Image (cartoon, grey):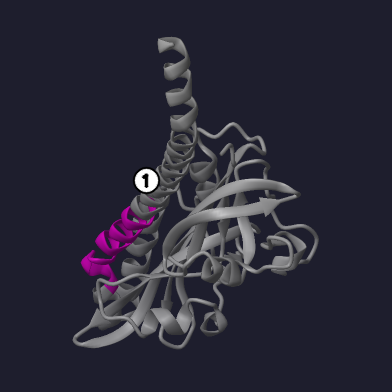
């Protein structure tokens, strides 16, 4: 009789145990996404602080105060050396100083000083937003194809102010692969549990299950030639998040290729990180 009673109690508690287990798995997935979001925020913060720190070197301001071409030339050489040191220390592919007219004053590409300086940087994706900032602030750009390193990159840009006027912007680029590697680290690369990063335009820019190429192919700099749009069935990212409660973070359940999955998400600097795991409840 005691055995039968215990069995009945077990049967009665089983749904609660299973539900608790399923909730724990979703909570664990949420923790994974939160941890990856935190790591991504730290990476952005380090890059921002490093750039602002470099921009405080007086050579940048002194360049615009120089009273002779010789002095200006000496300061330009000093700026080149600063950029070379920063590029090596912070692992950036390209770094440049651009004046308010969109003319490059200095550019370093993969350890080399460039001499074919551009006069058309005012059309760059980061130019206007960066000049709109107050000093010691940093604009973080959407991804774009760098014409200098021929890879998809993210730019960090800060203004240079001289006697109360913004005279230039200092900018450097980190390769998209840096962020892809960070987000995929520690994940098995299978379909049972994986992480995606989706940009503001709805393109999947990182996927822990597979490598997404970031090196330029041919002449294309079009997002759609490199990245796939995010959809669950016919549902866009925005619609999916709205269905699951909206906001900047959350969790729920979706069906992928006929299989129920738990999903958790958080937004970081315009990207949405989404963790998926096959639902076992």
256 or 87, which is in the foreground?
Answer: 256
Q: Residue at x 45, y 11 (%)?
A: 3
Magenta highlight on residue 196: no
Q: How many marks can you see?
A: 1
Q: Residue furthest front?
A: 1
The answer to whether 13 is drawn above or below residue 236 in the figure is above
The reply to whether residue 228 is in sight is yes
The answer to which image quadrant residue 203 occupies is bottom right
The answer to whether 3 is drawn above or below residue 25 in the figure is above
The answer to which image quadrant residue 152 occupies is bottom right
269 or 220, which is in the foreground?
Answer: 269
Magenta highlight on residue 48: yes
Residue 22: give x, y in percent of width and height. Answer: 49, 39
Q: Residue at x 38, y 76 (%)?
A: 169
The range drawn in magenta is 43-60
7 or 102, which is in the foreground?
Answer: 7
Residue bearing mark 1: 89
Q: How many residues crowd mark 1 within 10 Å: few (<14), some (14–19), many (20+)? A: few
Q: Residue at x 37, y 68 (%)?
A: 76
Q: Residue furthest right?
A: 218
Residue 7: give x, y in percent of width and height. Answer: 48, 19
Residue 172: give x, y in percent of width and height. Answer: 44, 62
């Amino acid at each position: 009789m005691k055995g039968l009673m215990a069995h009945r109690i077990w049967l009665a508690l089983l749904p609660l145990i299973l539900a608790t287990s399923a909730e724990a798995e979703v909570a664990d997935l949420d923790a994974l996404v939160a941890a990856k979001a935190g790591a991504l925020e730290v990476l952005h913060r380090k890059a921002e602080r490093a750039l602002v720190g470099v921009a405080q070197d007086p050579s940048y301001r002194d360049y615009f105060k120089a009273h002779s071409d010789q002095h200006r030339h000496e300061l330009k050489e000093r700026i080149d050396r600063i950029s070379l040191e920063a590029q090596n220390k912070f692992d950036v592919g390209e770094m440049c100083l651009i004046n308010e007219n969109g003319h490059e004053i200095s550019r370093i590409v993969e350890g080399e000083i460039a001499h074919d300086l551009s006069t058309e940087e005012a059309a760059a994706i980061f130019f206007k937003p960066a000049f709109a900032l107050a000093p010691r602030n940093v604009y973080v750009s959407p991804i774009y194809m760098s014409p200098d390193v021929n890879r998809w990159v993210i730019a960090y840009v800060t203004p240079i102010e001289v006697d109360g006027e913004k005279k230039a912007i200092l900018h450097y680029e980190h390769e998209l692969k840096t962020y892809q590697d960070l987000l995929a680290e520690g994940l098995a690369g299978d379909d049972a549990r994986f992480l995606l990063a989706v940009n503001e335009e709805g393109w999947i820019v990182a996927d822990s299950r597979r490598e997404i190429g970031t090196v330029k192919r041919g002449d294309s700099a079009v997002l759609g030639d490199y990245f796939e749009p995010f959809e669950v069935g016919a549902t866009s990212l925005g619609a999916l998040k709205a269905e699951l409660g909206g906001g900047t973070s959350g969790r729920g359940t979706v069906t992928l290729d006929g299989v129920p999955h738990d999903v958790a998400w958080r937004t970081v600097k315009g990207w949405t990180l989404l963790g998926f795991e096959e639902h076992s409840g």
